[in-house]
C-alpha cells in the first residue's frame, strides 16, 4: 500500500515510520509512507499555506493553490490513489472502513490544519472525507497516522503468527475475552483454571462466553449488530435464566421482607 500524506508538518511522520510493525512493513516493502510538505507548493515571499477567511471570522483557512498543486503532484506519482481529506466532517472511521480501504493500492491523505480547508478543494480535489471521531484536533496528521496504522495491520503478511488472528475484534461486533500470561498467580489473583487445563474445547467455550459477557457489559451497542450463532444465543439465554432466578428469589425474600422498612 502506497500512502502519500500531504501535510505542513512532514517531520511528524518520522517517528511513525521508525517503530514496530509499521517500520517492519516499510522494510518489507508492504507499505510506503511518504510525507509531502504542502509548503513546498506554496508561492510568494512568505510561502504561506493559510489565509484569513472571506467574510471575516476567527482562524485561518488553508489556501487552495498550494493544496491543489500538492494534490496534483501526488496524483502524478500515484494516478489511481484515492484522495482522502481528514476532517471532523467526514464519515466516521471504523474497522469496516479500514477493511474497505485496505483493498486499495494507494491513498493520498490530506491533513487539514487551522479552521479548515478552502471549500473549492473539498469539492474538486477530494474523493472521500474521513473523521476518526467527534473531536477537533490541531490538524489531520494524527488522524492520518491512525488510518495508516489500522490499514497496515490488515495487509497480508504484515502481522506475524504471534500477532495475527486479531482481526476479529470489532469486525465481528464482539470484544476479545480477557487474556492472561505467566505467572499463573499474580498478587493474589489467579488465572481462570480452565485456561490452564489444556482442554481446548472447554477453553474455546470459556473464551466465547467471556467475550460475549464482556461485550454485553462494555459495548452492548456492538452486540445488537452481531449475527448471533445458536451457541451464542444459548449462552445469552442461560444468563437470562440465571438473572431471572435472582430476581425471583428477591420477590420472595425481597427487600423489606426482613427489615420491614421502606
Ligand atoms: C480529522 C478530527 C479527522 C477528527 C482538525 C483537523 C480531524 C481534524 N478526525 N481536526 N482535522
Image: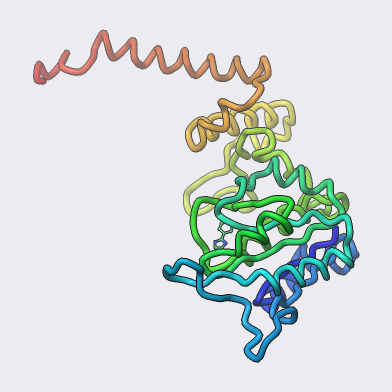
Rendering quarter of residue 67: bottom right
Against 7, residue 185 (above or below) is above
Rendering quarter of residue 107: bottom right
Q: Quadrant of ligand 1?
A: bottom right
| Quadrant in the picture for the N terminus | bottom right
Against 19, residue 2 (above or below) is above
Residue 134 at x, y = what percent? 50, 51
In this image, 2 relative to 49: left or right?
A: right
Which residue occupies the extreme bottom position in the image? 45
Residue 183 at x, y = what percent? 61, 53
Task: Please state which of residues 57 and 249 is positioned toward the viewer in this rendering.
Answer: 57
Residue at 66% x, 69% y: name it.
64
Task: Please state which of residues 147 and 5 is positioned toward the viewer in this rendering.
Answer: 5
Task: Please state which of residues 150 and 211 is positioned toward the viewer in this rendering.
Answer: 150
In this image, 50 relative to 110: left or right?
A: left
In this image, 87 relative to 38: left or right?
A: left
Residue 120 at x, y = what percent? 65, 60
Residue at 79% x, 54% y: name it.
82
Residue 180 at x, y = what percent? 62, 47
Rendering quarter of residue 209: top right
Against 24, residue 46 (above or below) is below
- Colouring rule applied to residues: rainbow
| Quadrant in the picture for the C terminus | top left
Which residue occupies the extreme front position in the image? 55
Residue at 24% x, 12% y: name it.
253
Against 34, residue 156 (above or below) is above
Residue at 42% x, 17% y: name it.
243
How many numbered circles does the render carry? 0
Task: Please state which of residues 150 and 262 is positioned toward the viewer in this rendering.
Answer: 150
In this image, 74 relative to 109: left or right?
A: right
Amino acid at each position: 500500500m502506497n500512502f502519500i500524506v500531504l501535510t505542513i508538518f512532514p517531520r511528524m511522520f518520522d517517528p511513525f515510520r521508525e517503530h514496530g510493525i509499521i517500520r517492519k512493513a516499510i522494510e518489507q516493502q508492504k507499505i510506503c509512507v511518504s510525507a509531502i510538505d504542502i509548503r513546498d507548493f506554496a508561492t510568494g515571499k512568505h510561502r504561506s499555506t493559510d489565509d484569513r477567511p472571506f467574510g471575516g471570522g476567527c482562524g485561518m483557512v488553508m489556501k487552495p493553490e498550494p493544496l491543489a498543486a500538492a494534490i496534483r503532484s501526488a496524483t502524478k506519482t500515484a494516478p489511481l490513489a484515492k484522495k482522502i481529506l481528514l476532517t471532523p466532517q467526514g464519515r466516521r472511521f471504523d474497522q469496516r472502513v479500514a477493511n474497505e480501504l485496505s483493498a486499495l493500492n494507494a491513498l493520498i491523505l490530506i491533513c487539514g490544519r487551522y479552521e479548515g480547508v478552502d471549500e473549492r478543494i473539498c469539492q474538486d480535489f477530494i474523493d472521500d472525507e474521513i473523521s476518526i471521531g467527534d473531536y477537533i484536533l490541531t490538524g489531520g496528521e494524527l488522524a492520518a497516522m491512525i488510518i495508516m496504522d489500522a490499514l497496515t495491520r490488515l495487509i497480508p503478511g504484515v502481522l506475524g503468527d504471534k500477532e495475527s488472528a486479531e482481526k476479529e475484534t470489532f469486525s465481528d461486533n464482539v470484544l476479545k475475552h480477557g487474556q492472561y500470561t505467566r505467572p499463573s498467580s499474580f498478587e493474589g489473583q489467579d488465572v481462570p483454571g480452565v485456561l490452564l487445563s489444556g482442554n481446548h474445547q472447554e477453553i474455546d467455550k470459556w473464551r466465547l462466553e467471556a467475550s460475549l459477557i464482556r461485550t454485553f457489559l462494555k459495548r452492548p451497542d456492538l452486540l445488537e449488530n452481531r449475527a448471533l450463532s445458536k451457541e451464542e444465543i444459548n449462552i445469552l439465554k442461560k444468563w437470562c435464566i440465571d438473572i431471572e432466578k435472582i430476581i425471583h428469589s428477591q420477590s420472595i425474600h425481597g427487600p423489606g421482607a426482613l427489615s420491614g422498612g421502606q
